[in-house]
Amino acid sequence: MKHLFKTRLHAAAFVLIPACIGINYLGKLFASVLKLPLWLDSIGTCIGGVLGGPIIGAVCGAANNLIFGFTTGDSITLVYALTSLGIGAAVGIMARLGHMEKLLGAILTAVAAGLTAVIISTPLNVIFWGGATGNVWGDLVFAWSQSAGLPVFFGSFLDELVVDVPDKLITVLIVFAIVKGLPKKLTSLYDVNDEVESLD
Amino acid sequence: MSFIEVKGLKYKYPHTSKLVLNGINFEADKGQFIGIIGENQAGKSTLCQAFAGLVPTMFRGAYGGKVLIGGVEASKVPIAVLCQKVGLVFQNPFNQLSGAKDTVFEEIAFGLQNLGIPREEIGKRVEKALMLLDINKYKERNPFDLSGGQIQRVAIASILAMEPEVLVLDEPTSQLDPQGSESVFQVIEKLAKTGITIIMVEQKMEKLAAYCDKILLLHQGTQVAYDVPERIFSRDDLKKLGVKPPIYTQVSKLLLVNRKEGEEFIYPVTLKQIEKQKDQFPSIRSAGVRERNSEKQDKGVFSIRDLSYYYVPGVLVIDKLTLNLDMRPTAVIGQNGAGKTTLVKLLKGLLKPKAGTVLLEGEDISGRTVAQLAKKIGYVFQNPDDQIFKNQVLEEVMVGPLNIGMTRKEGEARAREALEMVGLLHAAKENPYDLDLSERKMVAIASVVAMDPKVLILDEPTIAQDVRGREVLGQLIRTMEEKGKFVLAILHDMDFAARYFRRFIVMTGGKVIADGPGDQVFYEKDTLIKARLEPPHITRLCELLGYEGAFLTTEDIRK
Amino acid sequence: MKSISLYIDKDSFLTRLHPFAKLVYILAAISVPLIGGALWMYGLFLVFSLGLLISGGILKKVFPLIAFSFTILITIFLIHGLFNKENITFLFRIGGLTFYREGLLYACRIGLNILNMLLAFASFVLTTRPADLVDDLEQAGFSPRFGYMITSVFQIIPQMMGTMNTILDAQRSRGMETEGSLFTRARAFIPLIAPVVSSSLINTRERAIALEVRGFGSKNKKTFLKEHRLSGGDKMFMFLMALLIAASAVWRILHVIY
């Protein structure tokens, strides 16, 4: 798998990333406007990973949180830059391994992305907010775990798990549907294995 | 050796099997103006991208042959180096902006900054480009707040500031309204005189005939001919190749005005050449009086009473409008900002009137939601990409019918019928995004037609359509009329409007200033001037030739 | 065009301060209490940030930002006040809920940390134009390509929001309902978001062409239209902040020794 991390850093990559960050923003906005019980704020990051590979995915994720953190005053997102980076990279790796071609693979990718998010976020939650996440459903689970006397770390892990895995599942399924519909002329821009073939 | 040499150029996009360019050979000298014509998918844009080195350096795929510009092989140098020799401007104005600059000045400077040109030099070059393109007054504006025509001029300025030796223009006006196109053409005319080599793809043949030293005619990736405009447009296989010669040539062919060059007949292609051969044109012909019987008073559809609308209080966009619309296919014409789109949005219920009423077949529409009105009123938006979300054309077209409660079977039958009407039934199983923009526009039209609405509203349907696309559209409008549907369109293309529509509503400043059939409206000189509109080409030509009567299409001359 | 940036165009000490100096301030505000470990240090920087914000005349704009994190603050106080494992000392009771001193103190520390971060960031975010920040970063050696990426986000989002409204109209015109039960709303999500996502991705192809033909891939060193250097005041401010961080470390060491 020597192409796993190969990346084309050309103009197309640098216009893809802002578009993906914009998509993240819209997903989040829409979820809140339509009052859906999900975040849906990593659709773009996942698209970046699927099209451009793990490096572009990771850059999408990290840049997303850094940019919003430093300009929209939502400094809480800054903390989770690491999580987004992980999600982008995880989806990128799964896509490069060929898992985003079929529905079953997409579900597997979603689980991988969800678990990555949980593993990175849990320590952050504990360090910064003593284990809570700010999501009502997740925090109910956390409150229950604490009242049941479970360790903070484990409680926070459960908190994150019940929120992130379903969210990533829906996100990756949306990404799967969208990427399948993109024209070849676009997706081939990000192919790393193509070289110019000679017709002479 | 010529300045530009293209030798045996072949190209195929990655993961495809068809050659989009297949054996292109031609040469051009420094300072020449070269036109490229052909129907959609002839390979015009790909060829433009080959000049800029994007094909194959950026897109990869399979490449053969050579493109030499001043001795440099386009496929062998990095794009960042080649861009100082060859500049490329393409259709979509918005996508050509860097998307990262807040003012026009910075936008134009962007390329020069990338190349590391010294700061003082950048300032000088940007000022020069601002002057040449006549956009100095927008210098400090945000480029995204400008109109399409203005942005296109900013795009040309951004390229010219890099001082290329060749300027490649890929249909720079195809997505602009007439006002915007005219401003861009004026600039191109100015540039042609500066001695820069220009290669231009364009659908407006009258313009190409006037500017070009030579024209390259392509068809499905192969080169059909490379010759002077007169010889290209005098060919008799143009129809088969999906190309319509300039209106001047069309009329000359009809009236057999030509000169013989060897075995060939050569027809005039510009107004200037027509004037030169004016004495050859048959004298005074008068168009027959058109039948008006069928146009007396049809059944009413919309009844609009004292309608007013504003976005900002105090600035009326629709000003106490009273109008009855009957079954005749109707074109709404007028310049940007005349209130055309606002009017049709009010009719569709997307906007709610600030005053007055809109009655649809006697019923006030104000109480209905847009989704409820969808059954009766179909509205096709300008940009098809604002609605497409399915991975298959047929599924996309079926969305509307299913939304309004048709069964799958019925919906599919309607969808197939609609696709047939726009000539895309063969693409029913394809992914809409694999089609090009003109075809996607047809998909959007079909997706509304399939809902079988009583009223069909079209917003600028002809933009980005080639000759064949326009014919399909015209046919669709006729079919809808026969089926007893009301078609209302906002149009900028007067030649098209005159051919297929029976009633014309001229708007300016939110008011209707003329209303009637074409042979009446297009001869009301004062009104047209007031609305800043021009009559169809043919009308102007017949006036020049001194022909009396109403001429709206070339067929009117034959009669 | 409506911007997503919170920058407020107002001439003040903060807007004149070099973005790097403000970044150093954020660093100091977060690290000093963490290194020093004393609660009063949070207080010190809270007062300091508030002072800066008031001097900039932008205090009012801070409240929405604080409201943003209000839910998480409440949650932290509830969960730790009630269930923290260190909880021993009974403090008070509301209804059937018993709050303990240890948990509330812990929650206080976290709450102060969040508030402190928010205010420090606010004094940066509200007074720095993103394009200027990127320009300064690039002049300091940051890759112009990544710089492009950041500024482009600020243009692309308002553009996408504009497209969104048209899409809403286009889908409603085809008979789609957008209001009603959770199921109806969830069903509307795809038809609304898919066109804007697909078209913005498809547009990247042309945008990439536009960049390539304008020398985006050039290896030459980029020219800057205006130079922006650190002033004496900026340097002074940064030096002061560095001093504070060092002082907090010394304080902590002394504290451990005695």
Image (tube, rainbow, N blue to C red):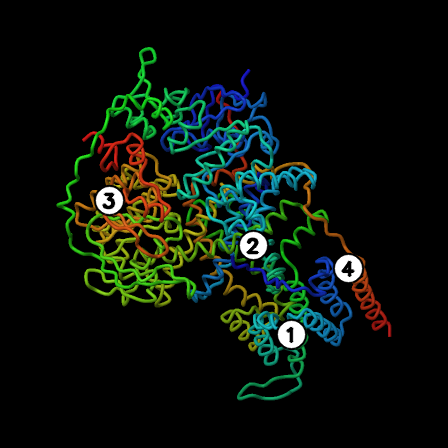
Q: What amino acid is found at the position of numbered circle 1 in the picture?
A: Gly
Numbered disc in front, either 2 or 1? 2
Q: What amino acid is found at the position of numbered circle 4 in the picture?
A: Asp
Can residue B412 be seen in the rendering of this structure? no
Residue receiving disc 2: C154
* Camera-side residue of C94 and C98: C94
State which chain disc 1 sits on.
C
First-in-chain label (1 vs 4): 1
Q: Is residue B86 left or right of residue B232?
A: right
Say above or below: C40 vs B461. below
Q: What amino acid is found at the position of numbered circle 3 in the picture?
A: Gln
Discs 1, 3: same chain: no
Discs 1, 4: same chain: yes
First-in-chain label (2 vs 1): 1
Q: What amino acid is found at the position of numbered circle 2 in the picture?
A: Phe
Residue receiving disc 1: C111
Q: Position of residue A163 (x, y in %)?
A: 50, 64
Check whether the beta carbons of the residues at disc 1 and disc 4 lie within 8 A of each other.
Answer: no
Say above or below: B547 vs A200. below
Q: Residue at x 45, y 61 (%)?
A: A30
Residue receiving disc 4: C234
